[in-house]
Image (spheres, rainbow, N blue to C red):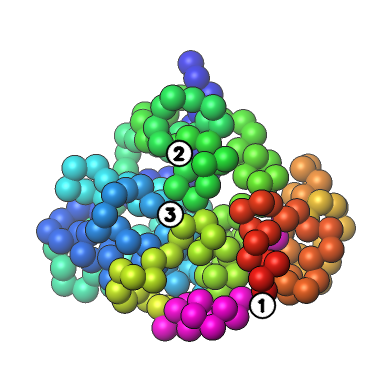
Amino acid sequence: MAATTLTHRALLRLSGEGVRDFLQGLVTSDVAGPLPVWTGLLTPQGKTLFDFFVWADGEDLLLDVEAEAADDLAKRLAIYRLRRAISVEREPILTVHWSPRTDNGVLDPRLPALGHRWLAPPDDPAAGWQEHRLRIGVTEGRAELGDILWLEANAAELNGVSFSKGCFVGQENTARMNWRAKVNRRLVVVEGNEPGPRTRIAYPELGLMVDHRRTDDLDGAIIPDWLAPQLTSA
């Protein structure tokens, strides 16, 4: 059996009339067009609550989110649902799969170097995903992104925001930062095992940490090719 299942991920199924329109008005990416996309659900101030992928499954949408955040995301969506006839339930059959090299699925919408992603019944657990994405400088999940301004999480560079789709929660501050080019802090991956004052989380088994740093204080940070041009122009 292949070892491709991301066991730390879960799927939420959104069903009901107008489910795309419902999500379109909430999240940072355009879910009215081709899927999957990577997106965020923010606070009104533009800070990250959840990041996840949106997949199409017929008329339904499947949200690919870290497992420990799935129930909280479902509750948050239920608040916005109001009286709409939309259900938000755990998907019991399908799981999220990943491989750095395969013909299965689609390239990760954030960055092709992250590899391929697809949905299918579970197989054996995948190995190496966390180090693979961190070495490329990509952060995800509440421990790394939570309460960080969405653009400081490198969302624009990773195709996680649309500035042409219309309104979403937190849009005003996010759009203002973009048009003024005022992204003065960034989430970056740093090699080392000694957390500093700006460290969000450390992974001692990998010798890596995620820091929230000013763009003029990035000594020791991994600066990937996809991010470097933005730091040069900052």
> Which residue position holds label 2?
107
Extreme right residue here?
194
- Taking the spot 16% from the left edge, 68% from the top edge, the residue there is 84
- Taking the spot 68% from the left edge, 59% from the top edge, the residue there is 228
Q: Nearer the viewer, mark 3 or mark 2?
A: 2
Estimate the x, y position of residue 177 in percent, counting from the top left.
53, 80
Task: Tell me where the magenta segment starts and ends, as one range.
Answer: 172-189
| Camera-nearest residue between 83 and 45 | 45
- Taking the spot 32% from the left edge, 34% from the top edge, the residue there is 93
Q: Does 91 sit above or below residue 187?
A: above
> Which picture quadrant has residue 10?
top left
> Which residue position holds label 1?
184
Q: Does 150 sit above or below residue 33?
A: below
Within 10 angstroms of label 2, few (less than 14), some, or many (20 or more) residues? many
- Residue 221 appears left or right of 64: right
- Residue 166 appears left or right of 180: left
